[in-house]
């Protein structure tokens, strides 16, 4: 297929940055390049760098976040439960269970694909300690209501903002406020570091915990590595993981961060808006609803195909060399996380959603072709 559903948008500047780390620095692990990347991320978000912890994946970032806020310690038995939408990448669920906690799959709103708080209220348990809203398709829908719900029920909020780096709510960047916010920098996200993730924790003690946890919980090893050293007389007081970011990854990420506002965000917004313009009069499909309070840099472009025609339309596009994705199979339908609790809205949305090509390397002509092929498919379905 000549067209790609999503792709990394990298070039000579990223290659030069990697070469500099390899040839000039010579240290490929976690060191000064990661330190600089964290400082620049903090500056971009408008938070103190001490509140950040980069990681080697977005899943690692989520795992660190859950571990830091969950009651008790890893290995000491069940630590409680977390409310999470079933319509999310399996990483959200795996991060919760990896920490010895239980993921409670919840309904989403049909119009947005984001958490249904009325359903969450029905699924609360005495051991529920957190709610994990997923900013599906970069949409931080009703985030204020989520924080109000959490306050009412004494819950922590762990935002799965893997899709939402560069997005804003009421003018404030996602990650610049809240409780714990996790991002992904994998190859196809709004910016990439090849692989990578980030936690922003607005509790300083927990942020320090996460900085240690990513380095096998060796106390204060982050500070040592950022000054070119290592901890040769270590102490470890809790379970940790090898989740740290490398200098090579940080070098790519630093270049990508400089391209976000000037290049990536405008391109993603323009292409997404073009989809909506070209299909505005098409009653057989629907785009997910967003709030005027939110300024979104879209990571993926989901489309609802109505009247039970999604599979036919998706296959028609595939047959005509238009790549189409499915984001995501609900977790309560997966064998490992299978739940008997009914989630009819989630399952309806899953039966309607397909994901269209979206990344900054696409042209307006590409989007026009996709929309024309969708109309042809609907006419034939």
Image (tube, grey):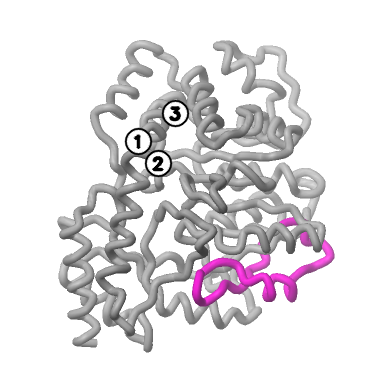
Magenta stretch: give its range: 103-130
Q: Could you classify mark 2 by the number of other residues whose Cα lies within 10 Å: few (under 14), some (14-19), or many (20 or more)?
A: many
Q: Residue at x 67, y 70 (%)?
A: 117
* Front: mark 3 or 2: 2
Q: Which labelled disc corresponds to residue 191? A: 2
Q: Could you classify mark 3 by the number of other residues whose Cα lies within 10 Å: few (under 14), some (14-19), or many (20 or more)?
A: many
User: How many angstroms separate mark 2 from mark 1 (CA)?
Assistant: 8 Å
N-term-proximal mark, 3 vs 1: 3
Q: Nearer the viewer, residue 44 or 22?
A: 44
Look at the numbered discs 3 and 2 and tell me whether their residues touch, using CB distance below 8 Å: no
Per the image, the residue denoted by label 1 is 259
Per the image, the residue denoted by label 3 is 250
Q: Nearer the viewer, residue 148 or 50?
A: 148
Please tell me whether residue 105 belongs to the stretch shown in magenta.
yes
Q: Is residue 373 above or below residue 46?
A: below
Q: Quadrant of the C terminus?
A: bottom left
Give the residue furthest to the right: 126
Q: Quadrant of the N terminus?
A: bottom left
């Amino acid at each position: 297929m000549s067209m790609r559903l999503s792709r990394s948008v990298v070039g000579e500047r990223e290659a030069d940055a990697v070469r500099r780390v390899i040839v000039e620095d010579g240290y490929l692990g976690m060191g000064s390049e990661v330190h600089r990347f964290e400082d620049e991320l903090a500056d971009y978000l408008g938070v103190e760098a001490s509140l950040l912890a980069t990681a080697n994946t977005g899943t690692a970032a989520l795992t660190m976040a859950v571990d830091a806020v969950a009651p008790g310690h890893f290995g000491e038995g069940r630590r409680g439960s977390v409310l999470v939408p079933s319509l999310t990448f399996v990483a959200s669920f795996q991060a919760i269970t990896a920490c010895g906690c239980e993921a409670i799959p919840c309904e989403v709103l049909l119009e947005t694909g984001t958490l249904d708080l009325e359903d969450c209220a029905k699924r609360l348990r005495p051991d529920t300690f957190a709610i994990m809203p997923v900013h599906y398709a970069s949409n931080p829908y009703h985030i204020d209501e989520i924080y109000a719900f959490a306050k009412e029920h004494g819950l922590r909020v762990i935002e799965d903002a893997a899709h939402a780096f560069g997005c804003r709510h009421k003018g404030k960047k996602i990650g610049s406020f809240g409780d714990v916010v996790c991002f992904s920098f994998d190859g196809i996200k709004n910016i990439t570091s090849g692989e990578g993730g980030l936690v922003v924790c607005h509790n300083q003690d927990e942020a320090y915990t996460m900085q240690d946890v990513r380095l096998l919980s060796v106390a204060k090893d982050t500070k040592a590595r950022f000054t070119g050293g290592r901890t040769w007389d270590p102490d470890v007081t809790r379970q940790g993981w090898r989740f740290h970011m490398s200098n090579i990854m940080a070098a790519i990420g630093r270049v990508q961060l400089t391209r976000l506002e000037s290049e990536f965000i405008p391109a993603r917004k323009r292409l997404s808006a073009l989809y909506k313009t070209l299909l505005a009069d098409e009653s057989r499909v629907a785009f997910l609803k967003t709030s005027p309070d939110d300024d979104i840099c879209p990571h993926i472009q989901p489309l609802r195909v109505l009247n039970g025609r999604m599979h036919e339309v998706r296959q028609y596009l595939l047959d005509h060399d238009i790549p189409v994705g499915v984001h995501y199979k609900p977790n309560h339908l997966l064998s490992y996380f299978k739940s008997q609790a009914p989630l009819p809205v989630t399952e309806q949305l899953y039966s309607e959603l397909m994901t269209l090509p979206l990344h900054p390397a696409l042209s307006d002509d590409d989007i026009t072709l996709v929309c024309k092929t969708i109309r042809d498919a609907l006419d034939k379905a």
